[in-house]
Amino acid sequence: MRNFTQNADAIIYNVPSGQRYAEGLMNILFGIVNPSGKLTFTMPHDFAEMNFTNAQWPGSDDGWNSSYSEKHHFGYRYYDQYNLTPAYEFGFGMSYTKFEYSDLEVE
């Protein structure tokens, strides 16, 4: 995956698509809206780096049953536990808009 990311100025990762995803994607591609989405999961460099067993993925019984033996150590928690750096972390993404707060008051 990293091979094409080194040569790309931007990547639009359209998953999971919904009922009206094409309209949203076209609005981004044609500059109608700001592409400001953030990843809702942690993306590894390579699927093998997650060290899943066959029981975890794809699962036993031709994928019908999976064993969740990793408990809460999956996604970004896996990377934190083993002090690894993912390809793209949970919440990764950028916006082409800059926001600035000023003169804030708390009452």
Image (tube, helix red, strand yellow):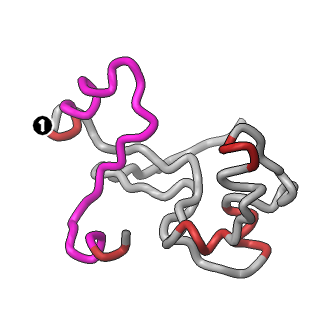
The disc labelled 1 sits on which kind of residue?
Phe
Residue 97 image offset from top left, x and y in percent: 30, 49
At label 1, counting other C-alpha atoms closer than 10 Å, the crowd grade (few under 14, some 14-19, many 20 or more) is: few
Q: Is residue 64 above or below residue 56?
A: above
- Say if the magenta span includes residue 17: yes
Residue positioned 79% across, 74% down in the render:
81
Query: Toward which corner of the image does residue 36 lie, by quadrant?
Result: top left
70 left or right of 103 in image: right
Judge by depth and name the residue closer to the eye, 16 or 12: 16
64 left or right of 38 in image: right
Residue 76 image offset from top left, x and y in percent: 68, 62
Residue 14 image offset from top left, x and y in percent: 36, 41
Q: Is residue 14 above or below residue 2?
A: above
Q: Is residue 76 above or below residue 38?
A: below
Residue positioned 25% across, 34% down in the render:
25
Q: Quadrant of the C terminus?
A: top right
Residue positioned 74% across, 43% down in the render:
61
- Say if the magenta span includes residue 105: no
Kindly give the residue lying farthest to the left in the view shown. Answer: 30
Q: Quadrant of the N terminus?
A: bottom left
Residue positioned 12% across, 37% down in the render:
30
Residue 35 image offset from top left, x and y in percent: 30, 43
Judge by depth and name the residue closer to the eye, 48 or 12: 48
The magenta segment: 4-27
Residue beneath disc 1: 30
Kindly give the residue lying farthest to the bottom in the view shown. Answer: 83
